Image (tube, rainbow, N blue to C red):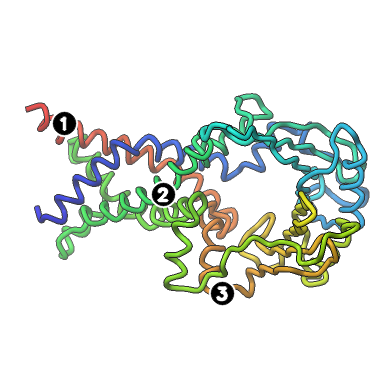
Amino acid sequence: MSRIKLTSRKLHLWIGLLFGMVFVTLGLTGSAIAWLHELDHMLNPDLLQVSPPPGLAAGTTIRFSPADIETMADTLSANPRYGRPSMLVFPEHAGDVVVAWYRPRRAPKASPLALEVARQVMLDPATLAVTGERNWGELGLSRRLLMPTLFHLHRYLVAGDVGKTIIGVSGLVLVLTAISGIILWWPRMHRKAIWQAITVSHGGSWPRFHFRLHRAAGFFAAPVLLVLGFSGTYFNLPTWIVPVVNAVASVTPAVKTLNRSSMPQSQISPAQAASSALSLFPQARVSRLTLPAKSSAPYEVRLRQPGEIRQGDGATRVSIDSGDGRVLRVQDPLRAQAGDTLLNWLFPLHSGEAFGLAGRIFITCFGLMPLLFFVTGLSIWIKRDFKSFAR
């Protein structure tokens, strides 16, 4: 065995033993949260489903005007039980609720293992009645908390900033796993060897079957694992990935946007902020509005334009000065630089939504692959390596 293959074999083995269960957890939870919206609505119809507005059938695409947005924000702000929200998330389809988010109150010396808990208040957009609330980040297996818990398990291993870092590092380790696996898979370049490397047969031996299944499945899975690992690291540790992308394709610098106006006597309204954003993208749908937390902070309006690869909320963002209403920053994914375009593709590829329903089904099924690799890899190790260690 060549030195490269021997090193790759040791690396592949120890990664599997040390990170195998992390990969299994990420795969299984990823299969579930590929359908987070649908499963959450199925589990909590009383919280997340309402009668559609008059004249609209359930499931019809719905758009909210700046006046609608203003009314929702004012309704919550005037209610002493809720107050001014930090963000409003607007549904894409009639029959779904508006979700008002309230900033988490985290203790100054909170443990790095702690999850931030944010309050969600659900609002019927037609009647402006509150259908209920829950704490996003609070763990539990109840109907209300199951899908948020699975999300936090997938994104943070329910371990706050520490878990977020572990997941980010695990993404890079997954990339190394795929690369070392391809090196180990690489057959001699003749027809019979190649065919044996990409097919599976039992041949009367379970160990041989496990080895060939592990090898062949790894060959076909490696490209997807590379994308999932790279994108997973970007989501959790962007400062590690952005410089790498920027080295080969331009990425817009990430800077904190602040108001340019002087301390305003009175801030512009949510309706004015939404109107300013829609004047730039009149065909777009407003999906989120982040309200300023302090006088120096702008409004952040998120929209989805027709033709965006990102589904749901979209990836178009407009920062609006909360003092005088001027546009401070525009992020348009349809006119982005090459590096920004690559980064904008990572979430749709990671979630499968880049390829519509078929892509999401594929990602759901692919979530079982880490379990397959762990079981077959463990079988190979027990049969071959463990016995050699025992001798």
Question: Residue 200: image x %, image y %?
Answer: 26, 47
Marks 2 and 1, how far apart in space?
27 Å
Taking 385 as reference, is 264 above or below it?
A: below
Q: Secondary structure at mark 2?
A: helix
Question: Which element carries disc 1, helix, strand or loop?
Answer: helix
Could you say where residue 183 lies in the image, as x and y percent from the top left? 22, 56
Query: Decide: marks 1, 3 in contact (CB < 8 A)?
Result: no
Amino acid tagged 3: Gln
Q: Are marks 2 and 1 in contact (CB under 8 Å)?
A: no
- Residue 299 is tagged as none
Circle 2 residues within 10 Å: few <14, some 14–19, many ≥20: many
Which residue bears the numbered disc 2?
A: 171
Could you say which quadrant of the image residue 284 lies in? bottom right
**Residues at circles 2 and 3 in contact by the CB criterion of under 8 Å:** no
Tell whether 96 sits left or right of 18: right
> Which of the labelled discs sits on residue 386, or is there none?
1
| Identity of the residue drawn at 73% across and 35% down | 119
Above or below for 307 versus 198: below
Residue 337 is labelled as 3
Which residue is painted at 73% across and 68% down in the image?
A: 328
Q: Residue 44 is drawn in which quadrant?
A: top right
- Sequence-wise, which precedes: disc 2 or disc 3? 2
- Callout 1 crowding tier (Cα within 10 Å): few <14, some 14–19, many ≥20: few
- Residue found at the very far left of the displayed protein: 391
Number of numbered discs: 3
